[in-house]
Image (spheres, helix red, strand yellow):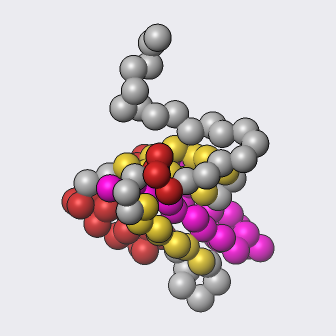
Amino acid sequence: MDLVVTYDVNTETQAGRRRLRKVAQICQNYGQRVQLSVFECRVGPLEMERLRNELEETIDDSSDSLRIYKLSGGRDRVVVTMGRDTYVNYDDPLIG
């Protein structure tokens, strides 16, 4: 399943800055950064649960915001990009 993960972590404190780095690292383990606080991920059901659990354990519910959007129909059918697009489709051959 294709997902978009977006987050807004409160970085006014040192703990918040640590959470921000940790959230980004977790997301990077499951997908690729397409904007500063936006990741696109392709995961199976078990990976989705792991990702969600890791993120829930990391964020501060009282000051951070995180959203996971499930892309029905896959990225190619539902994402429109404008400007620079750094997404790499790892399902395509990497050497042409």
Total marks drawn? 0
- Image point (47%, 68%), residue name: 69
Image check: 36 left or right of 95?
right
Image check: 63 left or right of 2?
right
Q: Position of residue 39 (x, y in %)?
A: 54, 53
Q: Which residues are magenta?
A: 1-28
- Is the N terminus in the top left, top right, bottom left or bottom right quadrant? bottom left
In this view, which residue lies farthest toward the bottom?
Answer: 62
Q: Nearer the viewer, residue 84 or 39?
A: 84
In this view, which residue lies farthest toward the left?
Answer: 46
- Image point (62%, 62%), residue name: 20
Tell me which corner region of the image, top left, top right, bottom left or bottom right, holds residue 13: bottom right
Q: Position of residue 28 (x, y in %)?
A: 49, 47
Residue 83 is at least partly visible in this image: yes
- Image point (64%, 58%), residue name: 37
Above/below status of 65 relative to 71: below
Q: Position of residue 22 (x, y in %)?
A: 54, 58
- Image point (44%, 19%), residue name: 94
Above/below status of 88 relative to 40: above
Q: Nearer the viewer, residue 13 or 37?
A: 37
Query: Is residue 24 within the magenta segment?
Result: yes
In this view, which residue lies farthest toward the front?
Answer: 77
Q: Nearer the viewer, residue 41 or 70?
A: 70
Query: Is residue 10 within the magenta segment?
Result: yes
Residue 21 is at least partly visible in this image: no
